Image: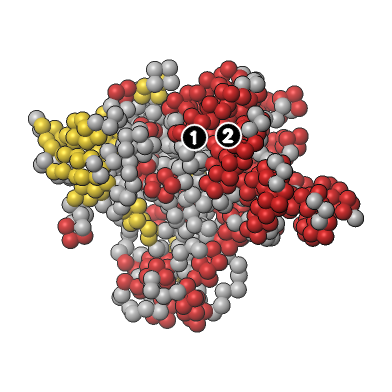
Amino acid sequence: MVAVGQIRIWASGIMSPLKVDWVSMKRTLFLAVVSLLVTACTEQESKDSATVESPVYVGGQACAECHEPEYQQWRSSHHDLAMAPANEKTVLGDFDQANHVQGAVVSNFFRKNGEYWVRTEGADGELQDFQIAYTFGVEPLQQYLVRFPKGRLQALILAWDTRSNELGGQRWFHLYPDEEINHKDPLHWTGPMHNWNHMCAECHSTDVRKNYDSATDTFDTRWSEHNVSCESCHGPGSLHVQEAKTGGLDSAPLIAGLKRDVTWVMNANTGIAEGIGSASNKNEINRCAGCHSRRSTLQEGHSADAFLNTHRPSLLDPAHYFSDGQILDEVYVYGSFLQSAMHQAGVSCADCHNPHTLKTRVVGNGLCGQCHLAEKFDQPTHHRHESDSEAAQCVSCHMPSRTYMVVDDRRDHSFRIPRPHVTQATGSPNACNQCHEDESVEWAMAQVETWYGDPEQTHYGEVLHGAHQEEAGAQPELRRLIEDESQPGIVRATAVSMLNASQPFVLTALLNPLVSDADSLVRMATADAGALVQRNQRMATIGALLRDEQKAVRLAAVNSLLDVPRDSMSAGRLEDFDQALTEYVVAQNLHADRAEAQFNLGRVYSSQGDLQGAVAAYQKAIQKQPWFAPSYVNLADLYKQAGREEEVEQLLNKGIEQNSRDPSLRYAFGLSLVRQGKHQQALAAFKTTRDLAPDSSHYAYVLGVAYNSYGDSAAAITELEAAHQRWPDNKDILLGLATMLRDVGELGRAKTYTDKLVSLYPSDRTVQQLLRQLQ
């Protein structure tokens, strides 16, 4: 069993809920791995003065003096209109006494003294008048920001559909139309999930500094420009401007390497262009990824040459992606694009998008025709549909879209081949059946096989899905995927993140070479996976990553090494650990307004023996976000260590009241009841835990053990045999069945499960001991 208190939280890269399908997040209670969401911005201009040593932000108007064509292209782009003061020119919504009804709440939009106002439900559940301070975005919807005390800006849960009447627009709509969001709900617009300072400001303004003061619980968020201006991408320009005026530009460039020296030349044989020059330069992608990715922020400011020094991107986890890597939740392009053959070939964002207008360089199939010969690919012999039809558009098959925020269609940038056979194996969607909804997956498979042949190669999505489901043989398949360096780095990293500790020696042997893998995401995932290694082997396995060149990797290593005793570290490794730990704490304090960061600080204090500091951090986390379950679990563990079991039960009951559907709370509550001798209540808690998390093999195993512990071996065996059908290779379940059957005298059945254990884990000492007993 995993001990209570060993819960770890790290970054999922969750960005603004204003652009996330929070309905799906709510149903999973969006409480797993959120750590450091994005940073915030500012309501006042930076007052820093330029120095020779350190360039500062000077504003886009300074750029326009020499770069007028680019500046004019940028004007009226989505970057230009990302955020603006609310006025006659910027507000698109109907504030002429317009009403919107959502459940029992009737919201009214009106104007007063030339200002824009809304009367809607406040934090106390009562109707109140709120003045609109800023517009947020422009197409296909516009949101609105309201000033609150202590420097907060909050984004309304109601948005204006800016599409035409013909497309169903020109209306107010609720961002969660099918959900009941009352003032106590975590998703209520007055709460932290709609807080602009933390959740969304970093990517809608330039040079954002969050400036949260934990002592006073206030924000003094600042920016250089309220929108996404030139220096958001090119970096602070003071030295560049200064040197331009004196003729010395070579000594003061902007962010290096954004412009690539690459020429695309068509290969007549393949019909696909090949890059000649610096196609491998990833600086442009790294720069765009600072906002166009699902990630968490490690330090303020973006980097062109080292994205993982400032941010930690999400991998292809099941909360954000389908098993095969297609977009599920809003992931902002980066994680999808890294999977693509385009990325592997050296294609970058600006090859398709004008970086100033943000529009595609060519409309329609001509965009793909820049690199894919139209005579070969823009033909019915390839796309198998009538020419010039919507189905014949390249994006229809290779970039299917999903709708977010009710009206915002976003295309998958993994540029994948439609694979109905992967749908059959994993349940992930495919472009064929997304159009042909009335046809079966088998029909789509037959069509694809008729046209293009039977796909022989296993897609990585099938391997990842098998690991999600803990299917038989999933772990060896993961290991093969990890070792296949022809696969995209984000795919290999995701496979690393799905390893388990069922074979400790195999795990360690696999991780050892990955510490020096060329791909930063693989090293980051390896640092995370180090937490699965036995504690006395952990530093030897991943300790070198404390000195990695990428901050995201170093911080992941620290996170996995927190509970390794300091006196077991060599002098050199202890120095590395302390340096990385300092960076880790700074990153958490950047987001001290969030429960996730307070939770992480609690783990740091606890690992350093500062139990009082740990308790205070967990209590602060609970105060900030009462629904955040891990804070209760780890705080309960500290109470347990102090022998305060009654307080443990009270605390966990409080957590369950706030978040009744979180299985970790029920599980911790059950363990507390076990320690108190309340066996029947504990059994009921474990049943509820299993029901809340039917896809968890661990909770199914725990319930079986609980039945057996309380004398009902028949129910225990029945429970574990059902679990075995679901997870046939699970080591704990197999061991549980073998030992329980042995103890009730059913040696033949026990031997069957033991033989399977031997075949799966031949070198495991516990398995070998059990085999000897039965023999």
Q: Quadrant of residue 239?
A: top left
Above or below, comparing residue 269 to residue 633 in the picture: below
Task: Identify the mark nearer the N-term, 1 or 2.
Answer: 1
**Color style of the picture:** secondary structure
Binning the other alpha carbons within 10 Å of mark 1 as few (below 14), some (14 to 19) or many (20 upward) gives many
Q: Residue at x 70, y 30 (%)?
A: 564
Question: Considering depth in this image, is 274 or 83 the residue closer to the camera?
Answer: 83
Mark 1 residue element? helix
Image quadrant holding the C terminus, namely bottom right
Q: Which mark is residue 669?
A: 2
Kindly identify which residue carries mark 1. Answer: 656
Q: Is residue 621 left or right of residue 176?
A: right
- Name the residue nearer the viewer: 419 or 302: 419
Residue 757 in the image: above or below residue 554: below
Q: Residue at x 32, y 44 (%)?
A: 180
Would you say residue 725 is visible in this rendering?
yes
Give the residue type at disc 2.
Phe
List x then y, in percent, for residue 470.
Answer: 63, 55
Q: Is residue 179 above or below residue 372?
A: above
